[in-house]
Amino acid sequence: MKKTFTKGLIAIIVIALQTNFSQAQFTQGFLSGNLCGSTNPAVTAIGIGNFSTSPSAALHVNTNLLPTNTTFGAGKVFRTDGPSNVDNLWQMFTVPTGKNPVTKEIGDILSPAGSIDFMMRSAQPGGTLQFQTNTG
């Protein structure tokens, strides 16, 4: 009986400690009444894929080391799907110095509802949309 109790106690301790080993795992929470996911505040980057070094951005997707026999095919790195009856939009925001948490939309990539158009826009009055090459 003592042996079984000891094994059970060890198993409970190991299971209880498991949460400390998954700090980068997304956790479920609420923000302004909406269900959302977040990470442990100590997590500074999220890497998706195989890495031989640390991720070099807050969100880094790396498919260089994945096998080529994946179900989605080599080179397909990122994809989003959205319903065609609403605008599909990626937005970029910035926080002006000293104005936290006030944000400004800098620009977006858009496919308008019911359209097959693809648009890139600068959102600020007087803002420009520039395509540049290395003129170095």
Image (cartoon, rainbow, N blue to C red):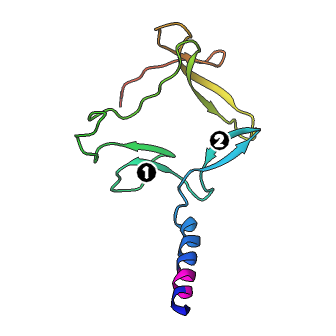
Name the residue tied to disc 2: 36
On the rendered image, what quadrant is the N terminus found in?
A: bottom right
Q: Is residue 136 above or below residue 31?
A: above
**Magenta-colored stretch includes residue 92:** no
Which is in the foreground here, disc 1 or disc 2? 2
Q: Is residue 1 above or below residue 30?
A: below
How far from the left and from the top, in percent, is residue 89? 56, 21
Apparent side of residue 99 relative to residue 37 in the rendered image (left or right): right
Query: For mark 2, does the 10 Å Cα neighbourhood hold few (<14), some (14 to 19), or many (20 or more) residues?
Result: few
Q: Quadrant of residue 70?
A: top left
Residue in the picture at 46% in, 8% down: 116
Which amino acid is tagged 1?
Pro
Which amino acid is tagged 2?
Cys
Q: Is residue 127 above or below residue 48?
A: above
Of residue 105 and residue 73, the one placed in the foreground of this image is 73
How far from the left and from the top, in percent, is residue 16? 59, 71
Name the residue tied to disc 1: 55
Of residue 51 and residue 36, the one placed in the foreground of this image is 36
How far from the left and from the top, in percent, is residue 88? 55, 19
Marks 1/2: CA–CA distance: 23 Å
Q: State which region is magenta.
A: 5-10
Q: Which label is found at residue 114?
A: none
> Which residue is situated farthest in the front direction here?
1
Of residue 117 and residue 106, the one placed in the foreground of this image is 117
Apparent side of residue 97 relative to residue 128 in the rendered image (left or right): right
User: Which SS does the magenta portion mostly show?
Assistant: helix
